[in-house]
Image (tube, rainbow, N blue to C red):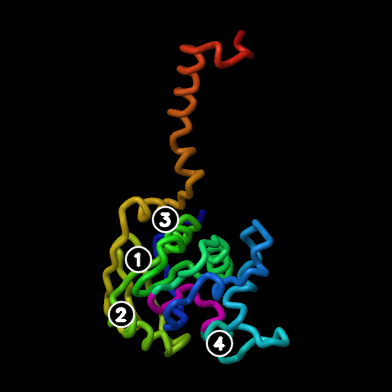
Amino acid sequence: MKALKELSGVAAPMPMINVDTDMIIPKQYLKTIGRSGLGKGLFHSMRYNDDGTDNPDFVLNKEAYKDAKILIAGDNFGCGSSREHAAWAIEDFGIRCVIAPSFSDIFYNNAFKNGMLLIRLPQEQIDELTEQAEFGSNAVFSVDLESQTVTAPDGKEHTFEIDDFRKHCLLNGLDEIALTLEKAQSIDQYETNTNNAHSWLNPAAG
């Protein structure tokens, strides 16, 4: 996955509470196991009218936010079913960071495994960021994972917490496969030692 060290761009304000994974990506998009192309279905029920046209009132359809890299959301974001497609859809749209007061545990884990940074901040800080995000393309936010700060358009820094393991993975672009491959030499050595000690486990050696 792509490393994430710094991120700068427009933040889309979406202060709804209890946005569940079905709202993020509805069931008709779950037939695929591919991660690409799901961005078109992101927030389908809110983003499109019944006839398939764009809903001009939805935040991500507004010109200022069509290329948003950051989403400022409400409490309990990502609740509902455990579908990993929700994280895939957000990342495929181009959003790499979601800032909210709280997240569903399963969605939180899925997002980090797919190279997204989820930031928890107190509600009063979320309210401040949401208000500034409503200025659209004139409001640029900066996220620095190394220093664990979000810098708002007004210049104020907001510090966030993240555990060391997730931070390490994001900074270095390491998913679970890449983490395993980091230990490839040790794994190969273990297999060699096992085969030498128990040759009967390897019929080809006989």
Foreground mark, 4 or 3?
A: 4
Q: Which residue is mark 1?
A: 144
Foreground mark, 3 or 2?
A: 2
| Secondary structure beneath label 3 | helix
* Disc on the earlier residue, 3 or 2: 2
* Disc on the earlier residue, 1 or 2: 2
Q: Which residue is mark 2?
A: 123
| Secondary structure beneath label 1 | strand
Pick whichever, 14 or 131, lies toward us: 14
Q: Which residue is mark 3?
A: 170
* Disc on the earlier residue, 1 or 3: 1
Q: Which residue is mark 4?
A: 58
Foreground mark, 1 or 3?
A: 3
Q: Which residues are magenta?
A: 65-75
Residue at mark 1 to residue at mark 2: CA–CA distance: 20 Å
Residue at mark 4 to residue at mark 3: CA–CA distance: 30 Å
* Disc on the earlier residue, 4 or 3: 4
